[in-house]
Amino acid sequence: MKHRKTFSISRRSLMLGASAAAALAMFGAAPATAAEGNFPNRPITLVSPYLAGGSADGIARAIATAAAKELGQPVVVETKPGAEGMIGSMDVMRSQPDGYRVLWGGAGSMMVVPALRKTPPFDPEKAFTPIAGSIDFSFFLYTHPSLEVDTLQEFIDLVKANPGKYNYATGNNQGLLTFNYLNREHGLDLEHIAYKGEAAVINDFLPGRVHAMFGTTAALPHAKDGKLDMLVTTLPERSPLAPDVPTMKEAGFEDVPFSPGGGWLGIFGPAGMDEAVQKRLHDAFNKAFEDPDVKEKIYLAGLTHTPMSIPELENFVRSQRDLYIKTVRDLEIPLLD
């Protein structure tokens, strides 16, 4: 019997013509400007393009609560999942750049989406105003115990011996790229099942309808209970939340060619936000990241916070955009229409 493991943009000043101002007035709200100096004077919406119940959405809600204290106005989380995060991202991209609608965006929703398409829906550097970041994710390979594999090599051997028999699920774009990497490098024949988020994957994972997933710590409690297995992490070092899980390199494989850990999140607004509004939000969300409740949730989710100035976040977005475009090209992943 197998031993089952358990685990103890360029920025520009905000300029709205008379027609745009009139349109906003029809909805009873005119944008705040630096001259007014009263931003914010109404609730702010933080759009989360991730399924409710997952790690990303849960941390967004904690950050929203903390940021509201700094801003003196409610920060309401609005979940808009779907299309690999593109629905929520494009919602904010098309919003008025007044600071009242911002995005809880990240590598999957902002980088992978355009990198995988023949005609990208947006350029992440030009379409958004960077506000605050980042939260860095830990990614792990989870498998169902019915596979009876304890290592990544055993998983690869099993799949290669049974082409087309097993599947993998993706509830995030990072998982999609990572499996593409493994499939290409090791000649795997796995069925792909796409979900809107990891919470939805887990519902099918536990009874065994899903066989494998590269995911965040959202599934960690089930691994601790022995209901799922964890084979490797894409982190450069072992996670303190799962110290028995080896890195890809320790397992005898090269590190996945993406950002450390496999993903990140930050706060972004539409392109063209007023710099004073951008700075106000930057300061508020940076303080929110340091809120004790937020820090605890980040730690318990196996994530880390890397504070960045606005110029640092701008440079980070640019480098990540180039990295993901190169990765998709190097992996020869067919581009989507």
Image: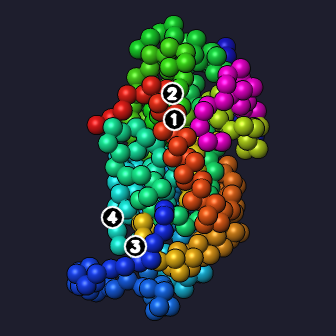
Disc 2 to disc 1, how far (Cα)? 6 Å
The residue labelled by disc 3 is 97
- Badge 2 marks a residue whose secondary structure is helix
The magenta-colored residue range is: 244-260
Query: Residue 27, position in %: x, y?
Result: 26, 82
* Amino acid type for the residue under numbered disc 1: Lys
Q: Which mark is residue 330?
A: 2
- Badge 1 marks a residue whose secondary structure is helix
The residue labelled by disc 1 is 326
* Amino acid type for the residue under numbered disc 3: Pro
Magenta segment includes 246: yes
Counting residues from the start of the chain, the first of labels 2 and 3 encountered is 3
- Residue at the spot x=55%, y=40% of the render? 323
- Residue at the spot x=40%, y=44% of the render? 114
Quarter of the figure with the N terminus? top right
Disc count in the image? 4
Disc 4 to disc 3, how far (Cα)? 9 Å
Query: Residue 328, position in %: x, y?
Result: 47, 33
Disc 1 to disc 3, how far (Cα)? 30 Å
Q: Residues within 10 Å of mark 1 (few under 14, many from 20)?
A: some
Does any portion of residue 160 appear in the rendered image?
yes
- Which residue is at the front of the view, 209 or 272? 272
- Residue at the spot x=48%, y=38% of the render? 325
- Badge 4 marks a residue whose secondary structure is loop
The residue labelled by disc 4 is 94
**Nearer mark to the viewer, of 1 and 3:** 1
Query: Residue 128, position in %: x, y?
Result: 45, 61
User: Do tag 4 and tag 3 residues touch (Cβ < 8 Å)?
Assistant: no
Counting residues from the start of the chain, the first of labels 1 and 4 encountered is 4
- Residue at the spot x=44%, y=45% of the render? 197
